[in-house]
Amino acid sequence: SSMDGYAVRAADVAGVRDGSGEVLPRLSASEARRLMAQGIIAGGMLPKVEAGLRAAAAGVPCRILDGRRAQALSQATRGLVGTVIEGG
């Protein structure tokens, strides 16, 4: 999968985690809002996800990935790392 048309948010985390601590490869806007309301997305992840939601609302999916990781961007272009936040 290509990164054409994606916003990238490099962070110090692997991506957005679900309630069991697993990194979610994809996250819809509605699912992101639900996880935020439940307190699963919290703390320092809130502004990252909120920025991703703004990008998705403008029609640009956003990938949150660990920018400290070697080759993170090249792996992201293949869909191997991070969480993509999409509209909907």
Image (tube, rainbow, N blue to C red):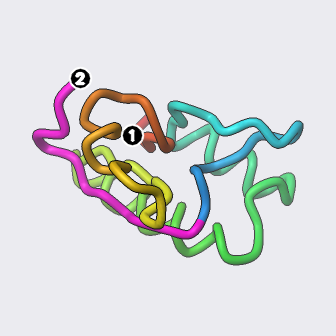
Which residue is label 1 attached to? Answer: 87
Question: Looking at the picture, which amino acid does disc 1 mark?
Answer: Gly
Amino acid marked by disc 2: Ser
Q: Is 10 contained in the magenta span? A: yes
Pinpoint residue 68: horizontal percent, then vertical percent: 47, 66
Which residue is located at x 59 percent, y 52 percent? 14
Specify whether 52 is left or right of 76: right
Indicate the quadrant where residue 21 lies: top right
Foreground mark, 2 or 1, reads: 2
Residue farthest along the front direction in this orientation: 70
**SS of the residue under disc 1:** loop
Q: Residue at x 79, y 56 (%)?
A: 37
Which stretch appears magenta? 1-12
Q: Viewed as shown, does residue 55 lie left or right of 16?
A: left
Distance (Cα) linking label 2 and label 1: 18 Å
Q: Quadrant of the N terminus?
A: top left
Please tell me which residue is depicted at 46% across the width and 38% down the height of the picture.
81
Please indicate whether residue 34 sits to the left or right of residue 49 in the image: right
- Quick one: which residue is furthest to the left in this view? 4
Q: Residue furthest top?
A: 1
The residue wearing badge 2 is 1
